[in-house]
Every structure is written in C-alpha cells, then in structure tokens.
Image (cartoon, rainbow, N blue to C red):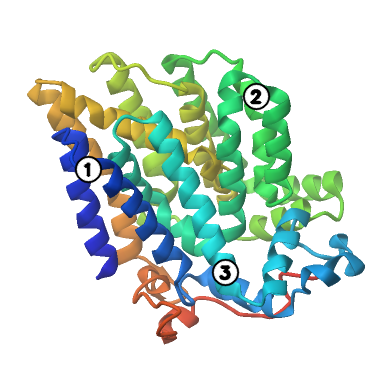
Amino acid sequence: MIYFILLFYMIFLSYKFDILKKKDNKLLSYWLLLFIFIVLAGLRYRVGSDTIVYMGAFKVVPPIDEIFSVGLKSFVYRPIWMIYFSFFKYLGSFYLLQLSNAIILNCTIFSYARKNVDCKFTFILFYYILFYIGLNFEVMREALAVSVAIWGYKYWIEKKWIKYYFLAFISFNIHDSAIILFILPFIRYITLNIKWGNLILLFLCITCLSLRSYLEVINLWVMNFFGESSISTKFNTYANMRNDYNLNYYLNYWYIPIILIPSFIIYANNKMKMEIKNINLLYLYSFLGVLMTFMSVLGRFSNYLIVFILAFIANFMVQYVHTKSIKIKFVTMLFVIAITIPSVFINYASNFNEVKFYNKYYPYSSIFNEFKDIKRESTANEIEGTFIVK
C-alpha cells in the first residue's frame, strides 16, 4: 500500500508543479519527496533479493581495520566497494550501509533533475516507476557506481576528460559494469542522426539474434582474453543463463529500449519539432537493449544512462504543457501509458523463483518491525561468504 500512496502523491505533485505550474511550496515538496525516497530505501528490512544476499555477505566481511591485512585482491568485489562495505562492518551496522547508499543515490538523482530538467517532478515520477526499486532495493553496488558516474556527466558534457575519467575510474572500482564509462567520451564525438540510429539499431537486432547460437564460442574467447578475472567469471555465469522467450521477456528487453524510445524520438523530432539532447546516448540505450537479447547481463550497462532517458521522458512531457495541439497531447499521454506497461506487467503478472515478482518488495518491512516475509526469503539465497572471497 505504501508504494501506491507514494505513487499517487507523486502524480499529484507532477500535475501541480509541472503541468499547472504552481509555485507554492514547490521546493519544500521536492525536498520532502527526496526525504521520503531516502527513508523508504534506507530503513527497509530484508526488502529485495539482493539486499538479503548482501546481508549474508556482511556477516563475514572483515572490518576495515583488518581488510588490508587480508588483501583487497582476495575478494570478488571491486576494491572501493570492499573498503566502503568493510567500513560499515567496522561500524557494526548493515542498516547504516543501506541508508548511506540511499542518501548518495537519491541525492544524486534529485540534484541532477533539479539542475538539468524543467519538469523535475515528472522526472522523479518516472524514476520511481522505472528504476527506483531496482537501484535502491537490489543492485546496491551498481547503484553506488551509477551515482559516481552521474557526478561525472557534467564533465562529459564539458569535455573535461581528466575529471571525467577520474570519476569513471572510481565508479569502475565499485562495480565492473562501469567499464562502459570508458567508451562514452568517444561517443561524445560521434554525430548520429535519427536515420543512422535506426539503421544501426536494425543491424544490431539482426546480428545479435543471429549470434545467440554462437554464445558458447564467444564465451570461450572472453575467458581467454580476460583470463581468471571477475569480468570473465561473471561473463561465463551469465552466458550460461538462458532467457525464456515469453511476453515478460519481450516487455523487459525489447519494448522500452528497442521499440518505444526510438519510436518517440522519431515522433518528437518530426512532429513535435522537439530539441532532443544527447541523442547519441538515447540510441546507445536502445543499442544496449538489443545486446540484452543476446545476453541479459549486458543490460546492466543501461543503468548508467537512466538520467538521460528520464530527462528525455520529462522533456517530452513538457510538450503536453506547452502545446495546444490535441493530437500532441494525446500522443504524449499515450507515451506515458505505454512506458509504464512493462513495470506493471513484470511486477504483477510475472514470476520469480515460483513466487510473484512483487513479493521481492511487498509487503514492505522496516527496521522498526523487522518482519520476515516467507515468500520474499525464498527469492534469495543468503549464502554467507559466497560473494565475498575468491
């Protein structure tokens, strides 16, 4: 119930401040919403499968005053995350760790929206619908890496590469998936129009679907190239996973990045005459969606582009406010409805480890009542040490 109350509250704020352009208590409402986001994620108790796994790992990780004697190379996690993780072990509280993560991630997202987006509440609304639960309740390491990456996007725009790569290096030493940050500067210099973006997208779709049968060969090449590293180990793990070609699969991996985003880029450019910023990164998000059809883990890279996707969605919504065209208003609302379908379907119609996907997060439990949900516990294996020591 708490999730729906918050959703309706954000819809109200988006309508009041972004559509009606009201000014009263706008800043207060924004920071209050940030506070709610932090508290909801930071004070949860065993909500999210990965959270349960991290709680198991936390029991065996050495505190920071011992970790250097053990050696950072002894752990499967990246070194900066291990230092961060072990610091909170020294403090003796996993809940301080998840509260710290919630503060860093959500302050970063809210700060980016405040500085770069006109329809801030709409930006946050879709952040909540599409990414909030995954980043806050599941991928804690990657969420921290994404936060650091967002700090660096200012320097990506300004082409201040030393500062950008410094933050990219930090992000990579939190989570392997941040390796994508090292290629983004090259994309900054590529001029990509909509026609070529769609042609490349089509080419990648055909190529990736064709290469799925050669995944084992590619896996061997990666293992030989990277040797016994965390990258090759994880690639091998995910390469051996197989996606089921069902409706849930297509909604998750095809619908938003490959179909919806490109379609509305075309409409926004041709019909709405909308200025589309960072179009290279929007298409990169779509390209990564194609790669997810080849191997789902490659979609982890797309988390580093979410602020650009959310900014596009929010700016698209601006047109609803500024235009008098009934057709454009209709298409805008159609876009809003269309982009929420995957989240609704995945959370309410799909299964995860023989229970409904939403059982990973519902019912909500806080550290003040410490309620263990049997269905949620079945979605995660709390194997102490498995994800810590090599």
Q: Look at 91% across and 68% down and name the residue there.
A: 69
Return the residue nearer the eye: 368 or 343. 368
Instruction: Give the mark, 3 or 1, whose residue is nearer the N terminus.
Output: 1
**Residue under circle 2?**
185
Q: Answer with left or right where residue 130 lies relative to residue 330.
A: right
Which-is-in-front pick, marks 3 and 2?
3
Instruction: Tell me the SS state at disc 1.
Output: helix
Return the residue nearer the eye: 274 or 221. 274
Q: Answer with left or right where residue 97 lies relative to residue 118.
A: right
- Can residue 50 be seen in this snapshot? yes
Q: In which quarter of the image is residue 366?
A: bottom left
Q: Separation of disc 3 and disc 1 at Cα? A: 31 Å
Return the residue nearer the eye: 189 or 222. 189
**Label 1 sits on what residue type?**
Ser
**Residue under circle 1?**
14
Which-is-in-front pick, marks 1 and 2?
1
Return the residue nearer the eye: 23 or 285. 23
- Residue 131 lies, in percent from the top left, at 42, 51
Q: Identify the image quadrant of the N terminus.
A: bottom left
User: Is 373 drawn above or below residue 333 in the view shown?
Assistant: below
Q: Residue 96 carries which label?
A: 3
Other-residue count near label 1 (Cα within 10 Å), few / some / many at <14 / 14–19 / ≥20 = many
Instruction: Tell me the SS state at disc 3.
Output: helix
Other-residue count near label 2 (Cα within 10 Å), few / some / many at <14 / 14–19 / ≥20 = some
**Label 2 sits on what residue type?**
Pro
- Residue 112 lies, in percent from the top left, at 45, 37
**Label 3 sits on what residue type?**
Leu
Which-is-in-front pick, marks 3 and 1?
3
- Can residue 210 be seen in this snapshot? no
Q: Look at 51% across and 37% down and name the residue there.
A: 305
